[in-house]
Image: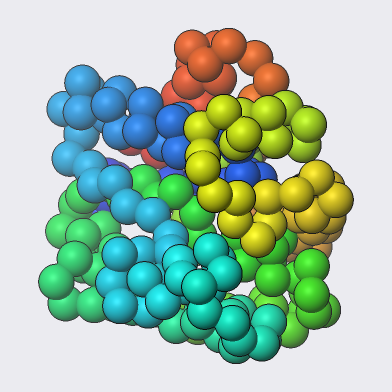
Amino acid sequence: MNNKDNRGAFIAFEGIDGSGKSTQSALLIQKLRQEGIPCYATMEPTDAPIGSLIRQVMTGRIKTDNKAVAALFAADRLDHLLNEVDGIVSKIESGVTVVTDRYYFSSYAYNSVHMPMEWVIKANEQSSAILRPSLTVYIDIDPDTALDRIAKNRFRQELFEKKSMLVKVRDNYMKAFKLLEKEEKVVIVDGNRPQEEIAEAVWNAAREYF
């Protein structure tokens, strides 16, 4: 899915909280603009109504069952792909490269802390059938380092931002990558290095899609 067929590429950034993936996705957008490549930055959960509801669940303002949370993520993702205002699919089909901060691997890693991963993958089947990333970039970082960053930058810790949870989430990412290695293109980038070195590694991995 690249400019060879006049469609945009689709790059998804993944990582545990505090990994620096949001910074790296922004730096990739900056690089694409410098290269004159039409691009669009987005994230999940989205700012749409379902995504806003998810954010309230994640901060503890709304309480609901873990399966309901997983279903909300799946619904928000489908809207993210298909809505008529700024859906990812329409942008890619018009030749715009989309860079997203989180996609369905986040659901596989986070929601599977509380339920079988196979269930979560099944719940997101429609999204993967509609659009798989050209490339998923996983920024890999030690959970202790991630928590140090989170403590410095945020006033409120979200539900998944505790060490034991981040360790489980990281393990789930690795399990999902192994489980889906034949279907998905994933590159793992060492996130413990300086920001500039990480950005260079990301660009070296992504540049072939442009």
Quadrant for the C terminus in the image: top left
Q: Is residue 182 left or right of residue 44?
A: right
Q: Observer-nearest residue: 117 or 18?
A: 18
Residue in view at x 17 percent, y 40 percent: 38
Q: Residue 3's quadrant in the figure?
A: top left
Residue 74 location, x and y as percent? 51, 79
Q: Is residue 172 left or right of residue 101?
A: right
Q: Observer-nearest residue: 86 or 210?
A: 86
Residue in view at x 29 percent, y 46 percent: 41
Is 37 drawn above or below residue 35 in the view shown? Answer: below
Residue in view at x 30 percent, y 64 percent: 47
Residue 29 location, x and y as percent? 30, 33
Q: Residue 25's quadrant in the figure?
A: top left
Q: Is residue 171 visible?
A: no
Is 155 drawn above or below residue 132 in the view shown? Answer: above
Q: Is residue 46 visible?
A: yes
Q: Observer-nearest residue: 163 or 174?
A: 163
Residue 193 location, x and y as percent? 65, 14
Q: Is residue 42 left or right of residue 11?
A: left
Q: Is residue 80 left or right of residue 129?
A: left
Is 167 drawn above or below residue 62 in the view shown? Answer: above
Residue in view at x 66 percent, y 87 percent: 65
